[in-house]
Image (spheres, rainbow, N blue to C red):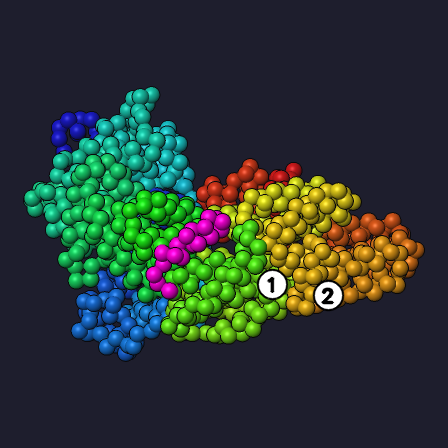
Amino acid sequence: MSESTMQRGIPSSLSTPAFVGRAEELSRINEVLVRADRALVLIEGETGIGKTRLVQELLRTHVDVLVVACPAYSRSFTLAPVIDALRDTVGDVRRLSLTPLAGALRPLFPEWGPHLPPSPEALSDPAASQHRIFRALAELVDALAPGLLVVDDAHWADPATLDLLLFLASRPTAAHRIVLTYRPSELEATSNLHRLTGKAPTGTSMLRIGLASLGVDDTRQMVSSMLQERPVTGAFAEFLHARTEGVPLALEETVRLLHDRADLTRRDGEWVRRHLDRIEVPPTVRDGVLERYRRLGAEARGVLRAAATFGDAVDEATLVAMSGLSPDEVSKGLDEALTVLMLEVRGSQFRFRHVLVGQAVYDAISPSEARRGHRIAGEVLEQRERPPLARLAAHFRRAGDVPRWCRYAEQAAELASSSGDETTAVSLLLEVVLHAELSPAELARLADKITYSAAVGVERLHGLVATLRRAVDAGDAAPQVRGLLRFQLGRALSNAGDYVQSRNELELAIPDLADAETALRAMLMLGSPFGTDWSGSRHLEWLDRAQRVEPPVRRSDRTRVLVDRVTALLGLGQPSGWDEAAHLPDDTADAQERDHLVRGHVNLSDVAMLWGRFDVAGRSLARAEHLARGGGYPRVDDLLMLNRARFDWLTGTWDGLAARVEHLADNEDIPPHTRLEPLVVASGLQFASAPEGTARPRLEHAWELARQFPLEPITIEAGSLLALRHLIAGRLDDALRVSSDALAMVRLKQLWLWASELAPVECERGIRGRGIPAAEAGLATCKAMLAERDGDVALAGAAYQRAVDAWSRMPRPHPALLVRERWARHELAVGATEPGIARLSAVFDGLADLGARADATRVLETLAEHGVERSRPWWGGRTGYGVNLSPREREVVRLVAQGRTNREVAEALFRSPHTVSTQLSSAMRKLGVSSRHDLVVPD
């Protein structure tokens, strides 16, 4: 200690902060781990709140621990955290007793190759392959027999790692104790971590620990522990607490910065601030880190820059290669970086104590130095026995080495796809397609590898369209390549919802497509009737033309052709589509064919609901859900949820449906034209359950929005709902205006199947003899209304009964009840009071059971006018707070009422989006509203 430092009373170095403010949490965790053989502990909290430190204290009292750390890579790598943890823990694999199943681990651990059983026979199905890998990894974990499995920063884990955790936690016969740390605010709505954190597996004790900020007293104790355990003034502790909000990381970095600035001194035995009115504390952790970084020596700064560029735990030799410093200089720099606690050492590896520290340092590196560092990092990783392909792609991309970036990205995508992680595979390919300078032929080749059933995202989808458009418009590609580019542009436009432009590009592509199978795919897309203003006959011409093309050789390609043809035929109202649908295979071991079957059953459920064949729709939905399980395709999962919500709406399964469709309508990963469907369903629910003043604006908004998108059946359905609402309210002119606009769209396409609820009489010629239950029920309703107009009570009654039966057979309970209501009102109007009252009472019971609150209230009022007293049903919330909002639900309602999305609410309240969605659903049910737009905070 120098004389000047001693005279100032400032310590020459600061201690590591003591563990404060978390004793109760630590005790609760130990209690459940000791008590239960199967335990799941969830530690959640914001950045820097102390999750990792809590785990470190926990590990002091536990042995045989397997720690899986999930780094903050810009792109997650398939199973990398688990592989790294097992490699570091196992050491010599020969000491473990493993079965032949462990041969499946050879691709993951090539360095163990001589000591592992032979590789089993390859599986063509990615889901089956992934399941076998999971079983082998579980066997390896069981052989290690860790007393505790810790997964740190699970929010950064790749999808395959999260699936593995679900697999490990859900095994009914295995004893396990798992501790997870994660940030709820950083979880995607589709993350599988929600499935693990939402409900404990059977037989597992679950403990959720939410870490809050430190209080002033804990702040005072923590700061004192850094300053030789000497007391800290209350004013100083309050000052630091106010500036850092009690976040431990921010508090530690602030104290270290004040120490480096010599802004600390002792007065009367207590640590205080010097120059209280002149001390400035950086507003962010990053500013504080950078100021501390600039005070370090050149060697330490060079080491920190190299470590930040590498982005993972790094050894000393790599730091020498990357920093340009000598071994002695790197050693000196490491000593200083470790002394000031910016780095920590684990074995022979060095890493930043917190990801924010590393990010702050990286952001301060000049672009030229960063490119050089990433190039060296990539070259070092290339020499490894098992090069990390995705990390190589990331380093060479940042180094500006496009050829190596593209090569490793494509290899990493193939590896991810083979292990069932299609989302990562598509993300890697999209990065190259969107940001690399590719030749037209390479662009077309890589674009064809993009699977749209994976999560592409709206923004990247639009970027892909723009990239392909530029390549087409450049005009420098050979005709065959130009045809392929146009075909890929047509695919991308179709998935973006721009069907008109998609069809234009596909028609222009076909003459240039030398490959017959690609031309066949284009023709089948042109045969699909959805989203265009073409007549049905024009689509049928393309289907006939496609039928004359030689079918593909591979079975999976033939299945894709069959799926596309069946979807188009049934969308066009052609009964022959059902005959061809019967040839779809039930299952397959081929991965690509399974993907086509999933899409086929999703589409089949959609068109079956359009026809009113809900038995077929239900079976197809269940089949698609079964086939999609473990496939790793978030967009397919979204479509399944959309179709399930629509199925439940149409068949009267409304419990909890409002919150589900609101969640889907808010999901920005779903293209806007697809999100129209849950919006229409939400409007339909509101139509049945909300007052006129609330329901009508939402319906009108849905109709106006629907008219902005390409023509599809959901467009006509939005118009039908609004027209019916106008009709019930007695606004005949408004009903005719909306129905006329919707009918004009149907006449354009000449597809009367789409208008089954809009104008059945007008479309009778187009549906007769085709076996379309929905249209036949609508036709029966219109005939009943005509019979009512003619004044024949008996004839009208018989016609209404046929209409009710037709709707009920599908089943469509809500339209059936509305038809019965009209029938009862007709009876009351002509003096048949007794049967009318009896029928209306039965309608009231049905509507109340369904949850159609507004409709039931309307019927209740009519019954009261005729002297019939019926009890109003209770539509309250759950027990606990009864019909009142809980404090947490009230917080959610307050923010949603301000116009915030679920994700924004989750970030503001430090909760997961899944939790917010659940609390919002409960609040909406208690408040009796169907739309988030109707929420107000009750007094």
Q: Are marks 2 and 1 in contact (CB under 8 Å)?
A: no
Q: Earlier in the sequence, mark 2 or mark 1?
A: 1
Q: Does residue 560 appear in this view?
A: yes
Q: Inspect this view and state whether residue 188 appears.
A: no
x then y, percent, for residue 579: 56, 73
| Residue toward you, 473 or 559 | 473
Residue on which the image places disc 1: 573
Magenta residue check for 228: no
Magenta residue check for 504: yes
Quarter in which the C terminus is drawn: top right
The amino acid pointed to by label 1 is Gly
Q: Residue at x 7, y 46 (%)?
A: 327
Q: Please give the label number shown on residue 249.
A: none
Q: Which of marks 2 and 1 is in front?
A: 1
Is 10 above or below relative to 748? above
Q: Which amino acid does label 2 sit on?
A: Ala
Q: Which residue is drawn at 11% across and 51% down?
A: 317
The magenta-colored residue range is 496-516
> On the rendered image, what quadrant is the N terminus found in?
top left
- Residue that numbered label 2 is attached to: 806
| Crowd around label 1: few <14 · some 14–19 · many ≥20 (10 Å) | many
Classify mark 1: helix, strand or loop.
loop
Q: Where is residue 648 in the image (x, y as percent from the top left)?
A: 61, 60
| Closest to the observer, 709 or 533 | 533
Tag 2: Cα neighbours inside 10 Å, few (<14), some, or many (≥20)? many
Image-based side of 328 in relation to 803, left or right:
left
